[in-house]
Image (tube, rainbow, N blue to C red):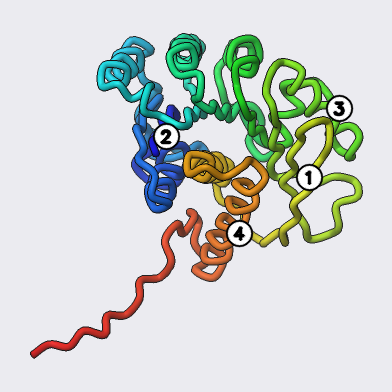
Amino acid sequence: MLVISIQSQVVFGHVGNSAAVYPMQAEGVTVAAVPTTLLSNHPRYPTMRGRVLDADLVADLLLGVEERGLIEQAAVLVTGYLGSPAIADTVADFAERALERNPKLVYLCDPVMGDDDLGIFVADGIKEVIWERLVPIASLVTPNQFELELLTNIKARDASRLLAASRAVAARGPVGVVDTGCTLIDTPPGIVETILCSDGKLLRIATPRLQIRPCGTGDLLTGLIAAHLAKGQDVETALRLAVDHIFGVLERTQRAKAHEMCLLPRPRRSHSKKF
């Protein structure tokens, strides 16, 4: 069970591959993690060091993935934050080759472009590559509500409009669309929804909205969905398992009063005795 995961990497915090890789490995999945950035932290901090990688370097790393035969071994391909239009095109070229060489490969496209708090935080031109090249070849697309509206120019604030926006994405090619972090007009107070649009129908999964909002929850969700799909689960089961896992992470994070997600539970006390 192998997942190829192409997204950002940070020194501190949990976004991109720095959020997704360990939880996927903890599910028993091997991960080939390809970075698109090397940054000190995510952009919600006052400063951020490091940089987006050169597209030639990303292309070289992806060539190494091909040379090791990982495309043929992989069950799932994940793409997230891409950093620059040149990287986006490089990743699109790789994804097209990968799907041609391994028709069984499931491709999860997380169109990381922004959120309600920060607005758009990607370079001009990335949206177009995602919409024109990556969405049409994806099996599953996982935008947050802000990104769904950005891609489709549909204000998806009620169920019918969200369904219309999700159908607009699905019409490009994906079998399913998972809309994350959703609050609709009829969403009960204190609730946040993760909504799967498949076969023109909505599956709404509700969880309590906790009084925290750490970065990287979407990256973690996509990674966990990928891990469960790689293990043979169907999309609905993979999504439910991923949502349950993330809620547990957020509960731990809230109890710890932590700014970054607490991916690991508190270690158990050792009961071994010294002699």
State the residue at coordinates (43%, 50%). 23
Foreground label between 4 and 2: 2
Q: Element at badge 3?
A: helix
- Which percent across, then down, holds residue 74? 40, 29
Q: Answer few, some or many: residues within 10 Å of disc 2's Cα (few below 14, many 20 plus, some between 14 and 19).
A: many
Q: Which residue is mark 1?
A: 203
Q: Is residue 84 visible?
A: no
Between 45 and 205, which is closer to the camera in this rendering?
Answer: 205
Quadrant in the picture for the N terminus: top left
Q: Amino acid at mark 4?
A: Phe
- Which percent across, then down, holds residue 269? 32, 80
Whether the residues at callouts 1 and 3 have beta carbons within 8 Å, the answer is no
- Which percent across, then down, holds residue 141? 64, 29
Q: Which residue is mark 3?
A: 164
State the residue at coordinates (63%, 18%). 135
Q: Which residue is mark 4?
A: 247
Sequence-first disc among 4 and 1: 1
Q: From what the image shows, is residue 26 above or below residue 113?
A: below
Whether the residues at callouts 2 and 1 have beta carbons within 8 Å, the answer is no
In space, the residues marked 2 and 3 are separated at their CA atoms by 31 Å
Whether the residues at callouts 4 and 1 have beta carbons within 8 Å, the answer is no
In space, the residues marked 1 and 3 are separated at their CA atoms by 14 Å
Find residue 3 and name its label: 2
Q: Amino acid at mark 1?
A: Leu
Q: Amino acid at mark 3?
A: Ala
> Could you tell whether 17 is left or right of 175 in the image?
left
Between 132 and 125, which is closer to the camera in this rendering?
Answer: 132
Q: Answer few, some or many: residues within 10 Å of disc 4's Cα (few below 14, many 20 plus, some between 14 and 19).
A: some
Foreground label between 1 and 3: 1
In space, the residues marked 4 and 2 are separated at their CA atoms by 23 Å
